[in-house]
């Protein structure tokens, strides 16, 4: 059985979150627009998600954690999404979000976008990005047919139902923050209690700095410099479809506060850091607020290394 702690949230209204997003975006982008809309069908291109909507008992789950990867990998830490959903009270629900792959299944470490309908009628549309040859900076982005992941995951769970969500567009970055960090810093400033958000966003135009994990390090990674020297960084082109989870404040659960992974129809994907083309970048996203945070199987020993 997985160790699970549930932290219920007092959700602000969507309208107050919109005002927070607008303030943050105004400092970071030349053009922006935020509104409450009916969630569109996210199963169609360019979103290509397993879930049609972001509503119905929405929650976020922080599973495992970076200490399972750093300083040395605990490869036995593998998680089944059916079990995670059941542990979070959402058997048969939809799960999206970034994690590491189950390396025992793939045969190598890699970045993963979980994109799954759990349960007996389950659907798996997940995508992974891995380094093909550790000696060469060559990667591939392919379908991942499993509903297991490894080490760590930041997940958004819901029933996949239609409903009201927050629609955000932003163009021409003028500030220094990435898209998610911009939104999340505003929430941290404007709300005393934690606000947890999950959803999807597109980098519709421009390029972004992403990383892809290579094979596991032979030596312990004891600092952020060690981690950055191990990771492989790339500039990749949009459109890039991201799944993202962010939490404004940690209520004492040892959370990773922001995490976004992406995939594409043209073979690019990985862990999102920031866009590299501020004059031409365009973002579009749909997000919903979580009713609760679930902390699943937290590492017994923790640290803050490698949480960018």
Image (cartoon, grey):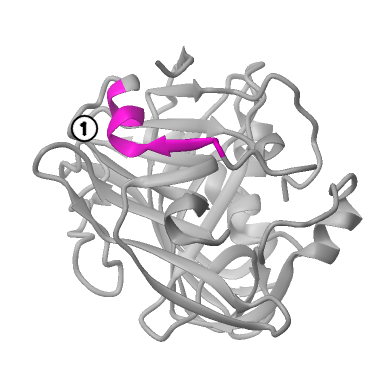
Q: Write down the quadrant of residue 56 in the picture.
A: top left
Percent of width and height locating residue 90: 25, 26
Q: Residue at x 50, y 40 (%)?
A: 154
Percent of width and height locating residue 96: 36, 48
Percent of width and height locating residue 52: 18, 53
94, above or below 60, in the image: below
What element does badge 1 sit on? loop
53, above or below 279, in the image: above
Viewed as shown, does residue 79 lie left or right of 221? Answer: left
Whether residue 170 is visible: no
1, above or below 75, in the image: above
201, above or below 53, in the image: below
Residue that numbered label 1 is attached to: 56
**Of all residues shown, which one is farthest toward the left?**
121
Whether residue 93 is visible: yes
Viewed as shown, does residue 253 lie left or right of 126? Answer: right
Q: Residue at x 76, y 43 (%)?
A: 72
Front one among 21 and 263: 263
Is residue 69 highlighted in magenta? no
Q: Write down the quadrant of residue 156 in the picture.
A: top left
Region in magenta: 76-86
- Quadrant of the drawing holding the N terminus: top left
Viewed as shown, does residue 50 lie left or right of 294? Answer: left
Q: Residue at x 17, y 59 (%)?
A: 41
Percent of width and height locating residue 155: 43, 40
Q: Residues within 10 Å of mark 1 (few under 14, many from 20)?
A: some
Is residue 81 highlighted in magenta? yes
């Amino acid at each position: 059985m997985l160790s699970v702690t549930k932290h219920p949230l007092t959700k602000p209204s969507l309208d107050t979150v919109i005002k927070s997003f607008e303030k943050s975006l105004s400092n970071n982008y030349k053009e922006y627009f935020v509104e409450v809309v009916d969630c569109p069908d996210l199963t169609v291109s360019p979103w290509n998600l397993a879930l049609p909507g972001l509503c119905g008992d929405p929650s976020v789950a922080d599973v495992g954690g970076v200490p399972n990867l750093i300083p040395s990998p605990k490869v036995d830490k593998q998680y089944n999404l059916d079990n995670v959903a059941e542990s979070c009270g959402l058997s048969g629900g939809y799960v999206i979000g970034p994690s590491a792959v189950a390396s025992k299944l793939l045969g190598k470490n890699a970045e993963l976008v979980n994109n799954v309908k759990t349960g007996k009628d389950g659907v798996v549309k997940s995508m992974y990005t891995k380094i093909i040859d550790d000696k060469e900076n060559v990667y591939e982005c392919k379908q991942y047919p499993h509903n297991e992941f490894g080490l760590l995951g930041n997940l958004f769970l819901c029933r996949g139902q239609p409903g009201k969500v927050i629609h955000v567009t932003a163009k021409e970055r003028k500030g220094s923050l990435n898209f998610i960090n911009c939104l999340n810093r505003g929430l941290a400033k404007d709300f005393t209690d934690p606000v947890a958000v999950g959803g999807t966003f597109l980098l519709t135009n421009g390029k972004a700095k992403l990383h892809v994990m290579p094979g596991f390090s032979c030596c312990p990674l004891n600092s952020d410099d060690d981690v950055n020297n191990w990771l492989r960084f790339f500039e990749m082109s949009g459109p890039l479809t991201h799944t993202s989870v962010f939490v404004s404040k940690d209520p004492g659960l040892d959370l990773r506060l922001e995490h976004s992974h992406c995939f594409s129809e043209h073979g690019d994907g990985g862990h999102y850091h920031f866009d590299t083309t501020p004059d031409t970048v365009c973002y579009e996203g749909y997000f919903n607020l979580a009713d609760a945070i679930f902390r699943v199987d937290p590492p017994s020993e923790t640290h803050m290394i490698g949480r960018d």
